Image (cartoon, rainbow, N blue to C red):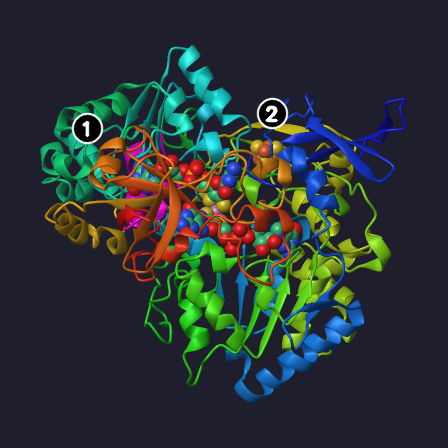
Amino acid sequence: MAAADTTGSGRQVHLRTCPLCEAMCGLEIHVRDEQVELIRADRDDVWSKGHLCPKGTTLGHLHHDPDRLRTPMLRQPDGTFRAATWDEAFARCGELLLPVIAEHGIEAVTAYVGNPLAHAFSLSRYIGILIGMSGIPMIYSPGTVDQWPKNVSSHLMYGAMWSIPVPDVRRTDLLVAMGANPHASQGSLLACPDLMGEIDAIQERGGEVIVIDPRRTGTADRAGEWLPITPGTDAALLLAVVHVLFADDLVDLGTVSELIEGVEKLRDLVEEWTPERVAATTGITAERTRRLAHQLAETERGVLYGRIGLCNQEFGTLASWLVDVVNILTRHFDVPGGLMFPRPAAWPLTVLPMPGLENGAPNFGRWRSRVRGAPEVLGHVPASCLAEEIATPGAGQIRALFTVAGNPVLATPGGDRLDEALDGLACMISVDNWINETTRHADVILPGMSALEQAHHDDLIWQFAVGSGAKYSAPIFPPTDGRPHEWEILIRLAGLCLGQPMREVDVAAIDDGFFDVLADVHGLDGPTLRAGYDEGGPERLLDLTLRTGPFGDRYGEHPDGINLDKVKAAPHGIDLGPNVSRLVEVLQTPDKKVVLTPDYIVADIPRLASRLDRPADDLVLISRRHLRSNNSWMHNVAVLVKGKDRCTLLIHPDDAQRFGLNDGDHAKVSSEAGALVVPIEVTDAIKRGVVSLPHGWGHDKAGTQMAVANEHPGVNTNVLSPGGFVDVLSGNAAVNGIPVSVSPG
Ligand SMILES: Nc1nc2c(c(=O)[nH]1)N[C@H]1C(S)=C(S)[C@@H](COP(=O)(O)OP(=O)(O)OC[C@H]3O[C@@H](n4cnc5c(=O)[nH]c(N)nc54)[C@H](O)[C@@H]3O)O[C@H]1N2
Ligand SMILES: Nc1nc2c(c(=O)[nH]1)N[C@H]1C(S)=C(S)[C@@H](COP(=O)(O)OP(=O)(O)OC[C@H]3O[C@@H](n4cnc5c(=O)[nH]c(N)nc54)[C@H](O)[C@@H]3O)O[C@H]1N2
Ligand code: SF4
Ligand SMILES: [Mo]
C-alpha cells in the first residue's frame, strides 16, 4: 500500500517493492511535486528488513528519464521515429501485421519476450495470453541464455520445469556456491534479500562458504575459500564428488529416501569418475575434490548451489542436474538448510503443466528449427536461431516479430547478425519503454508504464524465494492521459493475430475468460467469483491466485487465510514463514518419485568424457555482472554508469604478459564468431587462461535514443558468442568457456 505519509515537509512517502531483481527489496519512495526526491530502504519491510542496492535507488531516475517513451512511436521511411496517438499506433500495427498473416499464415509471426517480463506486474501475468491465444506457434526468450538447463533437469527429475529447489541459505552451515555471484546479481533462482549478509552470517555462526568460480568474485572474496575452476568443467567435478560419495560410503538420502528412484544406476554411472581422472581438466586437485564430497556429506546442514555459470556453458544440463543429485545424496534435500521447494503465496502460471509436457515426459525434439535444424527443448530453440529464421528466405520464414521487454541484439549470441536481419522484417512491433539497439528496428513501439505508475506484486520470483510472503505496492503516479496498461496491449496484440483490429479487441471479455480458466484450475466458478470484483486486470488475478494459494482464504472457506485486501492492509508486507518440506506435493512425475538418473541426461555423460581428452584451450572467455548494471537496459541511468569504465576485459597478469598487454591497453579479442576491441584490466582475481567481459553493453548504434548509455557505450560481448556453441541437451547458449585469442588492439 502507498502509505502516503507526509514528513511535514510536503514530501509524501510511499512504500514499494523494487521490481528490478529477485531480492524484492522494500523501498521508501519520497516524492514531492510529482518528483521522486529520495529512495531508501524500508527498514520495516517484513522481507528485506532494510536491504537495498544502488539500482533500487534509481527507480525515480528511470521514471523521470527523458528518453523513456510515454507515447507510441512510429518508424518513418527515413528511419527516424515520430510520436503517435494510440489509435494511430494500433492502426499501423494492423496495417503491417494483417497482410503478413493473410499471405504467410501465423507461422510467419514470432515473439521474443525478455527478462523484465518476469518482474513486471502486468506482463508476467498476461504474457500467457499473447502466447496461448494468438496462435503464434513458438516464441524466443533469453531463457536459453540463462536457465534452460535447470528447467530441463527439473522437468525430468520432478516432472515440473519450474519446480527448481533453492538453497535454504538462512539455515545452513555450509554453502558451496558454483557459478553464481550474488555480490553482483543479488541472487538468481534464489530470492533472498541481502545474500552477502547471509554469507557473513553463515561464517559468523561457525559455518563455511566455498565459492567455485573461474573468477575471484566479490562473493569469493567474502567466502572462506575460492576454488578456481576451468570454465565448463563443473559437471566433471560433480561427477567425481558423486563418485567419492559412493566410494567412501557417504551416501545418505535422509528424509526423502522413499521418494528417490535410481540410486544404484547412478552408482554404476560414476564408477569411473574418480577425482584423479578429472583433476587436470577441472583444475581442482583430487584431494580437494574428495574433501569437498566429505564436507558436504559430513555437515549436518549444508547445501550446494549452482547458477548461471553452470547453465550458460557447454555441459549446462549435466552440471545443473548434478547440483540437485549431490544435495539428494548428502541428505540436504527438502530439509531446512538444504535445497527446498518454495511455496509462493500467489501461485504463478508457471506451475501449470505445458501441453505435451505433462508429468515430466521426455518429449523433446518434437520439431526442429527450420534453418539450423536445432531440436526443440521444452518448446524453445536457441535464441540465436532467430536471426537466421528472419534472414533465410523460404517457406516458414519469419516476417513479423513482436519484442516484449527484450533486447536480443545485445543479449543473445550473434546479436550482431540479428541486428542486420531485423530490418528485413515486414512488421516489427515492440512493447518497450526505450529506443535501444533492438527497438530501433521496430515499425511501432508501444510503451508500457514506468514501474512507479503501476501496482506491483511479484509473481514468478516468489517461486525461488527462501520463504513465503506477500507484498503489494500501489501505483505512485497516476498513468498519464488514459494510456493502456501493458496487459491490455498484450491482449490487443493477441486479438490482432486473430484478425481483429487492435482498437476493437474486447479486452474485458478476454480478461474475463482468462480469469475463468484460472479459477477453474482450482475447481471454482469464474463467473460467480467475478461478480464480486469491480474491475478486472492483474489485481483481480493476483487476488484469485492469493486466495487459492497455500495460504489463501479460498473465498471465505478459510476465514483466517489471506486475500489481496489483507495484503494491501499490511504496508510492509506479510511474512508467511520459511520454506517447509514439501517434495511429495511438488512431484509430478508419473510414479510420484524423483527420477535421479533421467535417461535423457545421463546419455550426455560420454560427451563429457570426451571433453576430458580434449587438449586444454589456450584462453577462454566468460561473462560477468556488476551490481550497478541490469543486463542491457539500465546504462541510461547516469548515477549508475558514472565513474570508471566497467566494460573491460579482465585478464590474469601472466596472460597479459604473454600477449604483450598492459593494464589499460586496448586489446583485440577474437573468437570463431567475431572480434572486438576493448580496454583490459589486469588482475589476479581471475584464473590463468580465462578472460571475462560483462554483457549488455554496446550502446553505440545509430538511431538509439539513450543519451547517457550512448556516452558510455562499451562493447557487445555477444559478438564473440558463437550461436552454435550450446549445451546440447537444452540448447542453452554456452557464453562461458568460449575459446578466444587476444592481441594488442
Ligand atoms: N546487478 C545485476 N544483477 C542482476 C543482473 C544484472 O545484469 N546485474 N542480471 C539478473 C539476471 S537476468 C540473472 S539470470 C542473474 C544471474 O545471477 P548469477 O548467476 O549470480 O550471475 P553472475 O553474477 O553472472 O555470476 C555468474 C558467475 O559464474 C561464473 N562462471 C562463469 N563460467 C563458469 C563456469 O564454467 N563454472 C563456474 N563454476 N562458474 C562460472 C562467473 O565468473 C560469475 O562469477 O542476475 C540477475 N541480477
Ligand atoms: N554473454 C552473455 N549474454 C547474456 C547473459 C550473460 O550472462 N552473458 N545473460 C543472459 C540473461 S541471464 C538474460 S536474462 C538476458 C537478458 O536479455 P533481454 O531480456 O533480452 O535483455 P535486457 O537487457 O534485460 O532488456 C530488457 C528490455 O526490456 C525493456 N524494458 C525495461 N523495463 C521494461 C518494462 O517495464 N516494460 C517493457 N515493456 N519493457 C521494459 C528494456 O528497454 C530492454 O529493451 O541476457 C542474456 N545474455
Ligand atoms: S537488490 Fe537492488 S535491484 Fe534488487 S530488489 Fe533490491 S534494490 Fe532492487
Ligand atoms: Mo537472466
**Mark 2 sits near ligand 3, with its Cβ under 8 Å away:** yes
| Of residues 644 and 474, the one drawn nearer to the viewer in this rendering | 644
The residue wearing badge 1 is 289
Would residue 512 appear left or right of 218 to someone viewing this image?
right
Give the mark nearest the N terminus, 1 or 2: 2
The residues bearing labels 1 and 2 have C-alpha atoms spaced at a distance of 35 Å
Magenta segment:
304-328
Viewport quadrant of the N terminus: top right
The secondary structure type at the circle numbered 1 is helix
| Residue type at tag 1 | Thr
Residue at image location 71% in from the left, 66% down from the top: 73
| Residue type at tag 2 | His
Q: Residue 578's x, y, as percent? A: 54, 27
Kindly tell me whether residue 348 is visible in this rendering.
no
The secondary structure type at the circle numbered 2 is loop
| Rendered image: mark on residue 51 | 2
Q: Residue 387's x, y, as percent? A: 43, 69
Would residue 509 appear left or right of 301 to someone viewing this image?
right
Picture quadrant of residue 133 = bottom right
Q: Residue 59's x, y, as percent? A: 68, 39
| Of residues 360 and 314, the one drawn nearer to the viewer in this rendering | 314
In terms of secondary structure, what is the magenta stretch mainly? helix
Q: Residues within 10 Å of mark 1 (few under 14, many from 20)?
A: many
Residue at image location 42% in from the left, 24% down from the top: 337
Picture quadrant of residue 339 = top left
Callout 1–callout 2 Cβ contact below 8 Å: no
